[in-house]
Amino acid sequence: MQHGPIDLVLKAWGDAAAIDRAMEAAWQRFGTILPELCAELGDLRQPVTTKSRIVPVASQVGRRMVDACLPLSAEFITPMAAVAGAVADELGAALAAHGIAKAYVNNGGDIALVLEPGQALTLGVMGDFVRRPLPAMNGSLVVRGEDAVRGVATSGARGRSFSLGIADSVTVLAANAAAADAAATIIGNAVNLDHPGIGRRQASALDPASDLREAMVTTAVPALQPDEIDDALLAGLARASALAQQGLIVDAALSLQGRTLVLGHCVKRLEEA
């Protein structure tokens, strides 16, 4: 399903007639999402604070975005940090409402999962940018219906959005895709280093409409020494651990220049692909 900047891949398993009904419902809902978000774009680009609970965001996807970012409002974050995950969650809910027991909605790597008990999905984790010309798979993980995971999202300096950090990728598992999306943004920002070779520019200079405004976003990362890679990754891992202790995420995998650290609360290790 594609509409403007939204480009989704959906897959469901089960009875063919049920899948047809669920996909039709998802398609009907999909057509209304972008106009709703555009109507509220001004509010959705504002930083989230505790007062954001009373921001007049009326759309269901907009509320998902705000709710995902509110627990992270001690740092600079706008609801746009959760937009891809929130859209995936909305379409996942449309599938689940029609009796689908196993499905996914993949919004550019931010993924909502529909998994009833007894069901499972295997997900690949991409983020090794050392092996060129394309990023390689770091490994894979299995999410089961019994796990407290219904969302997976990835952020980083090499993604389609700006980042304040230098991570190649930060993949987060959480209760829903919007929560994973917002947390991946925050953890990705925390994978950082004070290094003269790291390129940074104001977000507004790169995109006048950016919700990050005057924040300095990463534009280039040089080859780093092993200890520098470790320092940056450990800073991000500490942020991920704090979010896990707050119950905001389940697990995270952080990658930078060929090295990956895994929080390990749910996924003990990444199986080699």
Image (cartoon, grey):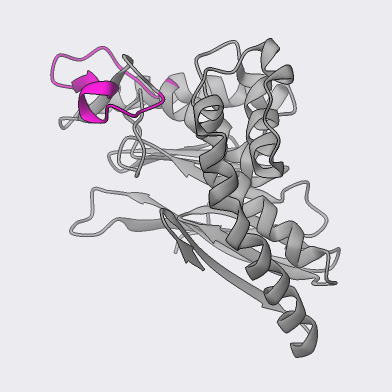
Residue 72 can be seen in this image: yes
The answer to whether residue 203 is magenta is: yes
Q: Residue drawn at (47%, 24%), measured in percent from left and top?
A: 236
Position of residue 197 in the picture relative to residue 100 (left or right): left
Q: Nearer the viewer, residue 103 or 7?
A: 7
Q: Residue drawn at (13%, 20%), measured in percent from left and top?
A: 197
Residue 69 image position (x, y, % from top left): 62, 26
Q: How many badges with numbers are in the image?
A: 0
Q: Quadrant of the C terminus?
A: bottom left
Q: Which segment is the magenta one? A: 190-211
Position of residue 99 in the picture relative to residue 196 (left or right): right
Q: Is residue 263 above or below residue 150?
A: above
Q: Nearer the viewer, residue 160 or 87?
A: 87
Q: Please tell me in which quadrant of the rendered image residue 180 appears.
A: top right
Q: Nearer the viewer, residue 62 or 109?
A: 62
Residue 71 image position (x, y, % from top left): 68, 20
Q: Is residue 96 above or below residue 109?
A: below
Q: Please tell me in which quadrant of the rendered image residue 131 appears.
A: bottom left
Residue 243 image position (x, y, % from top left): 64, 24
Q: Residue drawn at (54%, 60%), measured in percent from left and top?
A: 106
Q: Residue drawn at (27%, 39%), measured in percent from left and top?
A: 257
Residue 168 image position (x, y, % from top left): 33, 39
Position of residue 105 in the picture relative to residue 167 (left or right): right
Residue 152 can be seen in this image: no
Position of residue 138 in the picture relative to residue 245 (left or right): left
